[in-house]
Image (tube, rainbow, N blue to C red):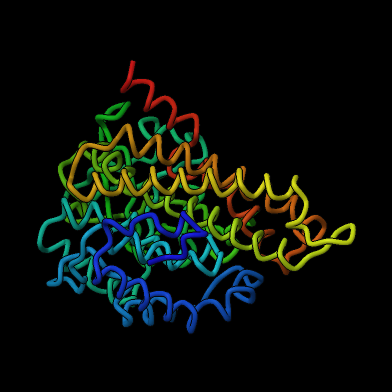
Amino acid sequence: MSDARFPWRRVGEDVLTAEHRLLRRTAREFVAAEITPHVGAWEEAGEFPRELYRTTAAAGLLGLGYPEEHGGIPADLWAQVVVWEELMRPGSGGLSAGLGSLHIALPPIATLGTPDQQQRFLPAVLRGEKIAALAVTEPSGGSDVAALRTTAVRDGDEYLVNGSKTFITSGVRADQLTVAVRTGGPGAHGISLLVVPGDTPGLSRSSPLQKMGWWASDTAELFFSDCRVPVANRIGEENQGFYAVMANFQKERLQMSIVATMTAELAVEASLAYVAEREAFGKPLAGHQVIRHMLVDMATQLTAAKQMVYAVAGRMARDEDQVTEVSMAKLFSTDVASFVTDRAVQIFGGYGYMREYLVERLYRDNRILSIGGGTTEIMKEIVAKRIL
């Protein structure tokens, strides 16, 4: 039983099994030994070692939820949620995003790919030997997937791919890219998905983009110039890729919601520890009513957000339609993370502005959460269309 003083820690006690709790302990011990001691250095370096993919896979934490015959570990959604939370515990959204980029690149292959494609594109990534990335966003389109301009023109048994993508997590180092391309006419009905090997002639990449946050993840702009990609690398039917991208977004939005609630949880707990030891005007910060009330607001919103996200995860685990609810969860949890991290920095004062303190990193890492995976404005439009 979790400490009753921290109600957010008790969320999930009624749904997580003994196996899930054992997995959490395993993941937490792995993270404490292999990641947390190095996070500061990796943040400053702007990347983490490729070897971390292998060690994470060897620990049984990288391939959860993928078929065993392709090197994965069969597991339910709750097992994945537990691991996503623990990988965020060091407080590096960039590391979590970079290490987890396979979870937005591989699902279309795992669900729509042929047996040959699954055998070619899943095992090496699930073993941590290759890095996979998803490439959808373009410089001109942002969240408007239906307007993407990267083209793939059929030429016999190949597609000729031209265009560019931007803000691609793991894009600098990816060995394979799941790329959304236009194979048909304008709009949503002309989009397909191709797996583009990282060494394809004509594919070039920018240097790592210099970001406000998520420093430990490499993020790139990609350029395709007459890249020849086999038709055999197309995932699913031609011109049906938009629907795969939209389905993929739902789990990505759940992931982003988990990252948001963990961001808020880490900020609340860091603030609670700080106010207990820091003094102002002759007494601990916790002795000042204004600080106590700030913490109450932070803790209340965190607990509410986590309850909401877990409720949505539970229904997604039962394969229920959660397009509306997961959009709401991302909208609400990222708003909560923004509020909580802002308050945390305020509580820490000048120290909250210093890079040696966790809340500084949480504050700047948080800013992408209401943008990535579909902006706040897109979430509101999705919900509006479903409820009006």
288, above or below 152, in the image: below
Find residue 293 and report its horizontal and vertical position in percent.
Answer: 68, 45
Find residue 311 and report its horizontal and vertical position in percent.
Answer: 32, 45
User: Can see residue 199?
Assistant: no
Q: Residue at x 49, y 50 (%)?
A: 260
Q: Residue at x 28, y 68 (%)?
A: 20
In this view, the residue in front, 160 or 198, is 198
Q: Quadrant of the N terminus?
A: bottom left
| Residue projecting furthest to the top | 388
Find residue 285 and report its horizontal and vertical position in percent.
Answer: 77, 58
**Residue 76 placement, left or right of 344:** left
In this view, the residue in front, 273 or 163, is 273
**Residue 31 placement, left or right of 60:** right
Q: Residue at x 40, y 34 (%)?
A: 328
User: Can see residue 325?
Assistant: yes
**Residue 337 placement, left or right of 329:** right
311, above or below 218, in the image: above
